[in-house]
Each structure stands twice: as structure tokens, then as C-alpha cells.
Image (tube, grey):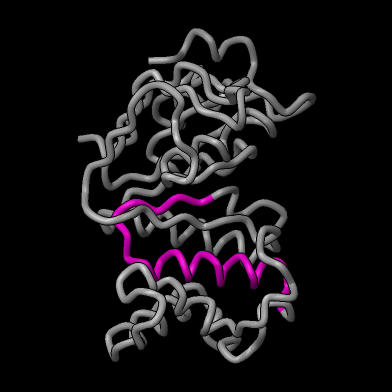
Amino acid sequence: MSQVRLEGVYAGYGRRDVLCAVDADIPHGMVTALVGSNGSGKSTLLGVLAGTVRPRRGSVVLAGQGRPAFVVQRSAVSDALPVTVREAVSMGRWAHRGLWRPLTRHDREVVTACLERMEVADLAGRRLGELSGGQRQRVLVAQGLAQEADLLLLDEPSAGLDHRSQQRIRATLEDLGGEGVTVVHATHDPGETSAADHCLVLTAGRIVASGPPEDVAPLWDGAGAGGPSSAWGTRHR
């Protein structure tokens, strides 16, 4: 069963299409790795799934209720943002409570559980700008988890992080798939596809391969230009 179906999607910015004729099915309750080199259209596709980028043509059909949760890269959050770690994760509850309504006891319990799951509970009183890159990214993932969405989108969540943070994030994403959450994470690292259930490979705004990681990962040319080899074109299905 598909959580998301895209048919003939063209999308971009201004008059320039970044995505061209994208057809894809994202399976429900599984981890999908969106693989491609920088500039391939991964972030734009995530924006389409999140509803922040409107397709110029084509259709996007999402199953389930509520809005997807979208976890941005840590570099998208300013060091000057005057919020603590707990406050940042609590923002994830706005999807349920709204901006002005106070958090309930349940909301606070959810926030605490997400802090603990991402191993940042001991940083709850610290400001985001004081954290390392890995700590900050784990906080942002915790904020996404706090939304309790059935579709979680992440833009290169492990890129450039310390080993502990990479392992914590990867383990969490793998566990979420087992809990029935549909996870889509973008990556340019073929090594991050090993724990995924499904892969979509983007090249120049087009999906050129899809399937289980054991089928598509061996064709990924991680060396040199860091892009997919010519063999990708024969494996889209």
C-alpha cells in the first residue's frame, strides 16, 4: 500500500522546473531513502511531499490524516534563535495545539519522550546556538517526532554529523518504520541506504531507479562525481 503517490509531477521555483515528470510510489510504514547527488532535486521533492512546494503539473496523493512532519537540516536554523532545546521540541506540538494554546500534560510527556529518544534530554535547558551540529540535528529530529505524524520527511539528517549522532538518527528512523510511520529521508551517501526498505534515485530532477536498496545501491557510484552511474537508467521500475 502506498502512503504517497506522485504522477507526472513538475515542480520548481519561478519558471524553472527542478523536478520533471516524476512518478513514484512511497510505501506505507516503511523507510524510503531518496538518493541523489547535490542538485538532483531531493530537497525540492521533499518540499512537494511536505506541501511547501506546489507542483506546476501532475498530482500528489497522500494517504493518512494530518500534515507530514518535515525535519530541515541544522544549517537552516539560526544560531541566534533564542529558544532552548525543550522549547524547540515543544514547537512540534503546535501541529496539535496551535501556536497560542498551552501544552497539556500529554504534550509535555510527548516532548520529554522525544528528548529522551534522541538522547538530548540532558540538554533540555540549553539554547540551540550552544549545541554542536550533531546535538542540534538530534533536537530537530526530536521536534519532528513530537508532531506524531504518520509521514516523517527529513532532509539529509545525518550529513556531516559525529558518529554518535549518525547512529542515533539512523537507529531511530529504522525503528519508526517498524512502528508504522512512513519515513522519507534524503541523502547523497549510498551507505545510508542500507537500513532503508525502499530507495528512489534522482538524477537531474528525474527518478531513474526505484526499488529495494540491495537492488539499487550497488549501482550507485559514490566515488568521483558522486552521482549515479549510467546503469541507473535501466533499473527504474
Q: Where is residue 14 drawn, in percent x and y? A: 61, 30
- Specify start and end residues of the magenta stretch as a single range: 131-154
Residue 187: which quarter of the image? top right
Q: Is 30 or 9 nearer to us in this picture?
A: 9
- In this picture, residue 67 sits left or right of residue 137: left
Q: Where is residue 105 drawn, in percent x and y? A: 29, 91
Which residue corresponds to the image point at 70% horizontal and 63% vertical from the top-left? Answer: 162
Above or below for 181 versus 81: above
Which residue corresponds to the image point at 43% horizontal and 15% vertical from the top-left? Answer: 236
Above or below for 24 versus 174: above
Q: Is 134 or 57 nearer to us in this picture?
A: 57
Above or below for 101 versus 155: below
Q: Is 206 or 102 nearer to us in this picture?
A: 102
Q: Residue furthest right?
A: 224
- In this picture, residue 56 sits left or right of residue 204: left
Magenta-colored stretch includes residue 140: yes
Question: In which quadrant is the N terminus drawn?
Answer: top left
Question: In which quadrant is the C terminus drawn?
Answer: top left
Q: Where is residue 55 drawn, in percent x and y? A: 44, 30
Magenta-colored stretch includes residue 208: no
